[in-house]
Amino acid sequence: MAEITPQPPTINGSCLCGTIKYHITGSPALKILCYCQNCRKSTGSLGMANSIYHRSNLTISQGHDTLRTYKDSATDSGSPVDRSFCGNCGSNLFCENKEKGPGLVIVTSGTMDLEDGQSWQPVMEFYCKDKKTWLETNLETKKFETVPAALENL
């Protein structure tokens, strides 16, 4: 009798208007909350909830022509971040820092359509120096004042 090899997990996602659809296979290398000024401004919120995947795990299945990218070169690290969003509804979808994370893509967790049994919980928090003092996450995460250098080895 042949052994059944489990299929890697797949998560589907989309922008707010549904024009851009994607899917990711496999598990993320990391799940983080980022409170840096650029993530706050990009989302218009307290920060950004992100999953970091190998770029090869992401497939954009619909809406390539609507995907827009802003090159964010005013980052704290000095490395530009490509921030991709829907040109129709403005949903932030993906980020790439090709200098610090070549071959990696950051997927915004708010755009993931999690199914029963799928969940999202961060394991790290970045830029805690910029986190609002009244914001308490009540999670046992590793907290960093900025971004740890070790991320370059994912």
Image (cartoon, helix red, strand yellow):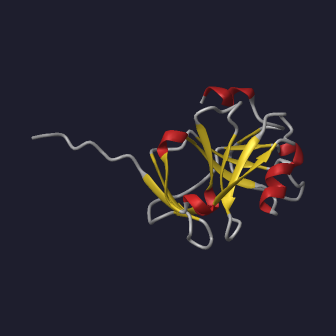
Q: Examine the rendering and report whether any part of residue 138 can be seen.
A: no
Q: Examine the rendering and report whether any part of residue 28 can be seen.
A: yes
Q: How many marks?
A: 0
Pick the quarter of the image with the C terminus.
top right
Give x and y (percent) for residue 7: 33, 47
Compared across the picture, whether 36 is left or right of 53 comes to right
Relative to 41, residue 4 above or below: above
* Quarter of image, res 90: bottom right
Give x and y (percent) for residue 35: 81, 50
At 75% from the left and 42% from the top, the residue drawn is 81
Relative to 133, residue 78 above or below: above
At 67% from the left and 28% from the top, the residue drawn is 152
At 68% from the left and 65% from the top, the residue drawn is 87
Give x and y (percent) for residue 130: 88, 47
Residue nearer the viewer, 8 or 117: 8
Compared across the picture, whether 11 is left or right of 32 comes to left
Residue nearer the viewer, 113 or 144: 113
Kindly give the residue lying farthest to the left in the view shown: 1
Pick the quarter of the image with the N terminus.
top left
Residue nearer the viewer, 8 or 131: 8
At 88% from the left and 59% from the top, the residue drawn is 134
